[in-house]
Image (tube, grey):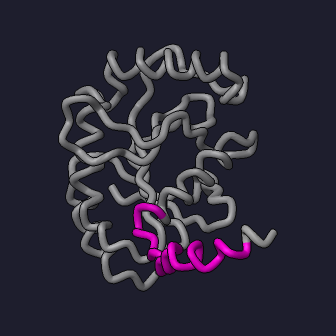
Amino acid sequence: MEEYEGQVPRLVANCRRPRPRRVRSPSEKEGAAEQQLVRTSLQPEAMVAFIDRQVVVPGSRLKRLDVVGLTREPNPVCILGEVKRWENPDIPELPSQLFGYYQLFADTDGRVKGTMYRAYQRVVEQKHQLGLLPTDLHVPPEPPPVLCLVVLCDYSAKSRYWPEAEQRLREGPVPVRKVHTSTPGCLIPPITEWETIR
């Protein structure tokens, strides 16, 4: 014990001061919301089941797409989702990101391209084998239509960033819907409550 006590002054002198707590960036805050969104989406009552997260298409210069999912209805729709939480100043980039991913995912008929369709059939199959997806969730026998979904989580109705993004989405070439959700849980509301932007 005496030997340890003799070392204490050297140990104290060698300690660093604690760093101030780092402020989390908007993307880190959104990452937590995305995780909740995905977990909640795998419950039987969820309107959309998200089967992939943080998607990057090889060779694309686009930023990551937050989530890819399928609606739970007789004729499922493929959802390309972007999550924005709180007052994120990056939201004006939403339109170009969603438009870019829509072009990568959808053919000229607005349905999932063959290559993407086969890739996600495999993803779902593997996740079923690993027990990561509900057994009732399946890729439909034919490529489904593609729809972009903006998920505003805990987002202010008085956002100064959203109006610009909404205007560009409205003028764009792809189908877009918007939903509001909140933490904890981030449950997507029923499809009948989705707001049509375009």
Q: Percent position (x, y) of residue 149?
A: 43, 51
Q: Which residues are magenta?
A: 5-28
Q: What residue lies at 45% left-to-right and 57% top-to-bottom? A: 83
Q: Is residue 94 left or right of residue 70?
A: left
Q: Quadrant of residue 10?
A: bottom right
Q: Percent position (x, y) of residue 77?
A: 49, 34
Residue 179 painted magenta: no
When the figure is inspected, residue 121 is found, relative to residue 152, above or below; the finding is above
Q: Quadrant of residue 107?
A: top left
When the figure is inspected, residue 52 is found, relative to residue 28, above or below; the finding is above
Q: Is residue 6 left or right of residue 103?
A: right
Q: Is residue 89 visible?
A: yes
State the quadrant of the C terminus.
Answer: bottom left
Q: Is residue 94 left or right of residue 35?
A: left
Q: Is residue 195 visible?
A: no
Question: Which of 189/131 is in front?
Answer: 131
Task: Report the number of numbered marks.
Answer: 0
Q: What residue lies at 43% left-to-right and 64% top-to-bottom? A: 84
State the quadrant of the N terminus.
Answer: bottom right
Q: Is residue 156 left or right of residue 93?
A: right
When the figure is inspected, residue 110 is found, relative to residue 82, above or below; the finding is above
Question: Which of 111/64 is in front?
Answer: 64
Q: What residue lies at 36% left-to-right and 26% top-to-bottom? A: 112
